[in-house]
Amino acid sequence: MAEAGGSEMEVLEEKEEEEQKEEEPKALEDSSELHDLETKLSVEQVCCSSDVPDFDWNSIDTSQLPDSYKMNSPREKKMLRIADHYHKQFTHLCPERKPLFLHPVNECGVEKFVSTTVRPTLLPYTELYHWDGCASFVSDYLTMEPLKCPLTPPSSLYSPTTILKYQRGNCFDFSVLLCSMLIGAGYDAYCVNGYATHSICSLDETLEECPLLRKPQEGPKEEVKKSSKYRVKSLPDARSKFELQQEAKKKAETEKKEKEMSMEEPTCDRLCGLRVHAWVLVLSGKREVPETFFIDPFTGNSHSTSDEQFLGIESVWNHKNYWVNMQDCQNGCKDLVFDLSDIVHWEVMLSESDKPLQRLLGAEKEKELFDRNMDDTEDEEEEEEEEEIRFTMPLSWVAPIQISPKEFESRCSQGRKVTLYKKAKLEKWAPYSNGNGLVKRLTIYADSYYTNAAEVREWFKNREDMLDRREVNKQTEQTTEYFSPGHPFGLKVHTYKSMSPQTERVMEFYTETRVDGLQKLAESDNEMKEYFVGRDDFKYFQHTEFRTKKKKVTLVGTRDDVNSRPIVQITECFHRNPQKPADEDVAERVFLIEEDVIQLTYHLKDKYITASKKDFFKPADSYRKQSEIMTPEMCITYQAGFPEQRTKLVHLYKLLQELTEEEKQLKQQVRRSQAELLKILEARENEEADIKLSASIYDTERNEKKRQEYEAMMKAKEDEFPGQTGQDLDYLAPFLIQIGNPEKVTKKQALRLRDDCLSDFKNRLVSKANIIQAHFEKEVEELQKKNQQFQAKQNQLSEKEEADFLAGYSETMFRIHILALRLEREKQTAPQKYLALEEKLRNDPRLAEHLGHA
């Protein structure tokens, strides 16, 4: 019975275990369903509660926009059909993936493929020739708008021209504009549709350290291996262990308080990995980019592709193609392969092979430069034949991106941009927007609430007093000013606590502008230190001590007489003069003014550990009047290596007279330095009281004198050639003459005029490129000849001939570099010029009737 009861109990336990196992997956399914439901509810709440931008995009005026904004060309329609077909295949093969961002509507409500919204543009500003300048401009010029729903891409994507006009946009608008500028500057750049953290998507940099405060990373120092046999033992640690424990305890308590009081701990983001963001990908290779990296368009900062703030990528695109990421993004972007030609990791939309198109258009290089960009002007039959072989991306529908010098200079959309970082606030202004020339200010705080300012750094531009930067330490009340070259007194750096004299201050100077070679001057109430560079007398340091006088009551508005401070001692230090023996070359001179003593210390001789010295004791005034005789008691000498050798009294007497005269000159020089210092302080007070900003001679808007001269010149030109100012050149005139200059042209004549004009323009562009190429090859050939001659006669050339050759070699290399840049620029701009002329011909009133939008 016991055995039967035991077996029954075992059966019941087994049934209970099976029931529990069956219930566990159900419970897990219920919990997962509950989690999914909570996620969906949170997503719906975020999408519904997202703030709508203050700016109403529906109110913008689109009536003046070109026709390309309001309709699609046949090739664009074809591209949209290809995109729809591609998207159907993608959703069929990858049903778990989110819909692709392919053809949102533009500002006119017309669907446009995202690649055609990218308009490669090289703007004529040196700063925008590099990626960091482009990124900085976009982040400063535009105002960030969050996505209406942070979990889905936007339903619209406006043109970069509209975004620039209204100076605002979301992350996709930022990225398209930045990508257009980078591609125009020669970078291999792509727009990215992906996912990022909440701080990146919302432009929240309060947890990031300000870039201006980041210290450059130092590489690991290699340890120097020493011989263990003769290694010097390190000194024992003599610090008190109790004091070290107390310091560590105090530091731990401080860190704990800061952690409790700080607001820096980020809250858990329930939508982590779901927030949509757009940024720019720059691949290595072009423009000597060594490594692939990301650019966040909101901040303009570069990031590594392994940055944990970027959580995944859906797709990338440029002006030529569109790629879908087929890689797993569980680890973010760390493990992604960015070889877009790898069809396993990236699914491309359009074929990238150029061989069929080359066979179709011919192998001539000049034709390839233009014909690849003339797809819209092909006949319909030729277009269909080409599409059968390979369909290429239509040209961008966006008008040319233009930024005027005034817009480029203004930068900040609202005149001022404020960015909050970790315990720091960065403010930026456009040049000339502040009367004192302030363009940037960084305020460093001691707390996370931005209330207790510890340090303020300010940057200035266009100031006549050449002030470039100012740093104010609020805790020590010390101010440091940095000046650009050109200050009337050659001032470089000025550190002070107060502008009043006899206070502690340090001044540094541009030594190239000073005759005395003064590099640095440090003054306090009772001393003045001067440092020199490049002097003929080899002096590099002078220290003057003063006796502090009792303070006297002075009238309001007057200065204390700094020159009235009695001089106690003057010390001079000299570098070694190799043209003199060491025991005759003075290393240090000390003038004890009140004690009437002069001390000389000479440089050390080789293999000596003591230096020669001379101490002179000047006689009292009463004795000096009675006799001019030099006595042995008036000079104590020590000659290193020659203890018995003594200098004659006549020589010592002459030396004493010379030193006495130099002492007088030194006193005068000290008074002049004090007077100059007072002048500098007075000049700085006047400069700060009446700040003046300078304007370039090319800035006719702010430079009134140059503007008047320009207006007078234009008026004189208009009087000399009346009726010709502003008149455009008629590019059809030479070709109209060939057909008899008819009042109205037929369709056949219109087509002939268009073809002749475009053909002539193409020939002139090719001819210009060939001329530059010929000059380039000629310079390279001459450089090779010079190099061969130099190698053959290198041992026979004098120093002057070698220097002349190197100077000529450098000039030739400069010319070759300029010609290469011009040739590359011609190759890049020639298709754009060709298309611009084609557009002009199409819109010309004399030809528009027959050409239209053919």
Image: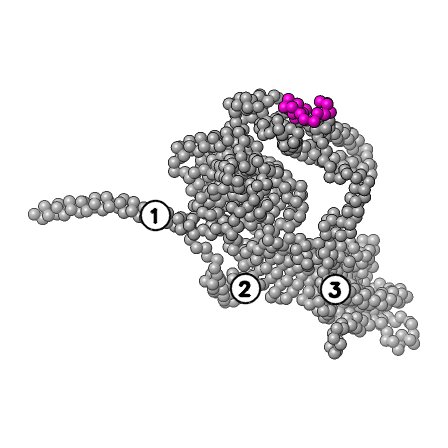
Range of residues picked out in magenta: 737-756
Q: CA distance from mark 2 to mark 1?
A: 42 Å
Quadrant in the picture for the C terminus: top right
Q: Earlier in the sequence, mark 2 or mark 1?
A: 1
Specify whether residue 52 is painted magenta.
no
Residue occupying the far left of the picture? 1
Look at the magenta stretch and give its main secondary structure: helix
Would residue 848 be seen by someone viewing this image from the given angle? yes
| Residue 686, numbered label | 3
Instruction: Give the residue number, with chain letter if any, for mark 1.
Output: 37
Instruction: Give the residue number, with chain letter if any, for mark 2.
Output: 451
Question: Could you tell me the amino acid type at mark 3?
Answer: Asn
Q: Is 28 placed above or below 667 here?
A: above
Q: Earlier in the sequence, mark 3 or mark 2?
A: 2
Identify the secondary structure beneath mark 3. Answer: helix
Residue at image coords 50%, 31%: 77
Would residue 763 be seen by someone viewing this image from the given angle? no
